[in-house]
Structure formats: C-alpha cells, structure tokens
Image (cartoon, rainbow, N blue to C red):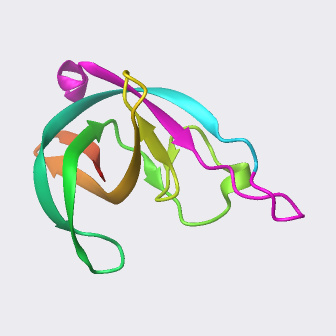
Amino acid sequence: MIGAYLVDTVTLRQNMGSDTHQEPLTPRDVSVRAFIDYGEHRIEDRTGKIVVSMAKILMRPRTTIMDGFAARAVNTIAYEDEIVYPDGTVHTVVKISQGRDFTIRSTNVYVT
C-alpha cells in the first residue's frame, strides 16, 4: 500500500563502522524508493534537543540499529547514515521513527 506513495528515489549511505585500527570502512550506498515531505519540522532528536528538520522522508519499514555496523543488512538504518538526494545533496539523519497509519507501515527519517 505505501508503495504507491513512494515517488522519489534517494540514496541511503550506510555507515559500515570502523576496522580494527579505528579507520572508517567504506560506506555502502543503497538506492531507496521514498517520499520526501519538504517542510520545516520541529522535532526532538535522540539526545533530547529540539532541532529543526527541513524534510521528513518516508520509506518502507527498516530496522533501526545502534551498533554492529560491519555486519549490517541492506534493510537497516542507523543515525550515523546519510541521505543523499537525487541532486547530490547530502543530509544528516536527525531522527528515525516507525510510522503506522492503519495498515500502512513506514520508517520516517527526519534530516537537516
């Protein structure tokens, strides 16, 4: 059902963590169908601060992870990831929430 609303395509740049020498591993880019809801949203980030998000991105449900980046699956998302718009603009993930509206389930990602 949510697939009908996903008219945009964004790139989810997944953080893959660090190697044994604490050097960052190469991130993995995953193309994701999404809906970009442009507009100003005042939200509370994961540290409890009120921040302004310039867009809310809806996508199919994904599992939010906090650690274990090197062995992560493609259908996961983390706060360390980045969202890349089709024009190449890179955005930081501020908040991840799981939306549910009757039978429609989605992952909502707020970006700066």
Where residue 38 sits in the image (x, y, percent)? 15, 38
- The reply to whether the magenta stretch includes residue 6 is yes
Q: Residue at x 47, y 45 (%)?
A: 82
Q: From the viewer's perspective, is residue 46 above or below residue 75?
A: below
Q: Residue at x 89, y 64 (%)?
A: 21
Q: Which residues are magenta?
A: 1-24
Q: In the drawing, does residue 6 fall left or right of residue 102?
A: right
Q: Residue at x 29, y 70 (%)?
A: 45
Q: Residue at x 27, y 43 (%)?
A: 106
Q: From the viewer's perspective, is residue 108 above or below residue 13?
A: below
Q: From the viewer's perspective, is residue 85 above or below residue 93?
A: above
Tell me the quadrant of the picture where the N terminus can be found: top left
- The reply to whether the magenta stretch includes residue 25 is no
Where residue 41 sits in the image (x, y, percent)? 12, 55
In the image, 30 versus 92, the foreground residue is 92
Q: How many marks?
A: 0
Residue furthest right in the image: 21
Where residue 112 sits in the image (x, y, percent)? 30, 52
Q: In the drawing, does residue 84 fall left or right of residue 76?
A: left
**Quarter of the rendering containing residue 105:** top left
Q: In the drawing, does residue 23 fall left or right of residue 49?
A: right
**Quarter of the rendering containing residue 6:** top left
**Quarter of the rendering containing residue 68:** bottom right
Where residue 55 sits in the image (x, y, percent)? 21, 44
